[in-house]
Amino acid sequence: MLKMICKLLPIPVLLLCFSFPVWAGDLTPMEQLGKEIFFDDISDPDWMSCSECHDPSVGWTGPIPGINAHGAVYRGAVPVRFGNRKPPSAAYATFSPIFYYDSDEELFVGGNFWDGRATGERLGNPAADQALGPFLNPVEQNNASKEAVLMQIASAKYADLWEVVWGEPINYETTEDVEENYDRVGLSIAAYEASSEVNAFSSKYDAYLAGDVELTDQEAWGLELFEGDGKCNLCHPSELGPAGESPLFTDFTFDNLGGPKNPENPFYDMPEIFNPDGDDWIDPGLGGFLQTRTEWADFAEDNMGKHKVPTLRNVGLAPSKQFPKAYMHNGVFKSLKEVVHFYNTRDVEEWPAPEVAENVNTDELGNLGLTDEEEDAIVAFMLTLSDGFKNKVKDKD
């Protein structure tokens, strides 16, 4: 009701409405604008929003069980078109640093997308760079131009909020106007993705770190293994930061885990204009992106097949225990148990060949020697990383 009343007020008074968090929960005006855009069907045809592939109920990733259980890659606004990778989680993505090469460790860090190509160099924020990509991608939201995106926002019910946030109505009269305001779209979405609504830090593990709850025996054993024999925390740090920062469960690096192709990936059947290699297509990951940049091209060969280390926060979040989620960049694995078993036994059991045989990590996985019970314990621990636990405790109180 308050939202409706505010919309009837003149701009000077309207500003007061947005100065109080009660208008939109705990969101600032800019975060609220980003949320409105995130959930708006800005596509051609106009049925697809960012949330179609990044749904909060499943940890801000793909929410359709039938897709997750098979190809794992989501269809675009034009239903016969598919991308080539499963949707990564949009949660906690705003913590990724601007893409850079760490010369001491001799590896690349940061950026967004599975291959890091949303570097953050343009807007100073990888999440903002990333947010602008799908709108214009013909196999995703398929908008004809930046101007087409801005026109849809200008005609939306929340257009007045744009003026509150940016101090002027949205416009696209000149090339400069289009560029400036399209960048503002990305910055607005990134503001929402950086909000406490998306990065809630409200899991059972967060409550455990705060001393508010104990882990079960199995979960505690899983944590011990996660930080020990499982070697999980080498890429997914689980401890508080030096100033007490909550762990993000990713080091924002890239790795080739030796995962196999997903034979059900619909991208293999895409027309030649989108996939000229057909069934022979191989995902080059980070190496493919590095090839496009002169200053990093010499590193491409050593990074073929590497993909962004994802956060494990919300990795098991789902509406039910039976709900299928897809894992790895191509969604080839369908349960956390399968993922952990692959990490544990890749080099000692029969698994399909890796999609990219070069640069496979053989130091931190492949023959961990874990028992079946130890695998289950690691899975149990990872299930404590789902946001919403603190809310459930409050509801019980």
Image: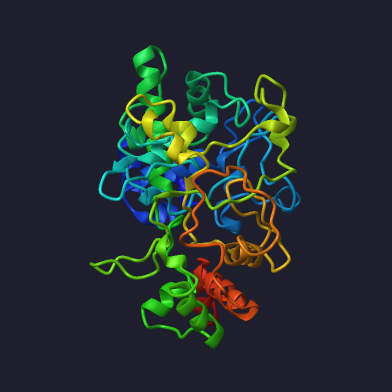
User: Is residue 99 visible in the rendered structure shown here?
Assistant: yes
User: Is residue 33 visible in the rendered structure shown here?
Assistant: no
Specify how the rendered protein is coloured: rainbow
Q: Which residue in the rendered view is the most extreme toward the top?
A: 174
What is the quadrant of residue 43 in the picture? top right
Q: Nearer the viewer, residue 100 or 217?
A: 100
Q: Nearer the viewer, residue 52 or 157?
A: 52
> In the picture shown, does residue 15 fall above or below 246?
above
- Counting every numbered tag in the picture gives 0
Measured as percent of width and height from the top left, residue 222 is found at 52, 78
In the image, taking residue 70 as reference, residue 25 lies left or right, namely left
Q: Which residue in the rendered view is the most extreme toward the left?
A: 243
Residue at 60% from the left image edge and 58% from the top image edge: 57
Residue at 51% from the left image edge and 83% from the top image edge: 221
Residue at 58% from the left image edge and 67% from the top image edge: 344
In the image, taking residue 321 as reference, residue 54 lies left or right, namely left
Measured as percent of width and height from the top left, residue 372 is found at 65, 77
What is the quadrant of residue 21 in the picture? bottom left
Measured as percent of width and height from the top left, residue 166 is found at 32, 33
Q: Nearer the viewer, residue 169 or 210?
A: 210
> In the picture shown, does residue 153 fall above or below 216?
above
Measured as percent of width and height from the top left, residue 240 is found at 32, 70
Q: Nearer the viewer, residue 130 or 39?
A: 130
What is the quadrant of residue 201 in the picture? bottom left
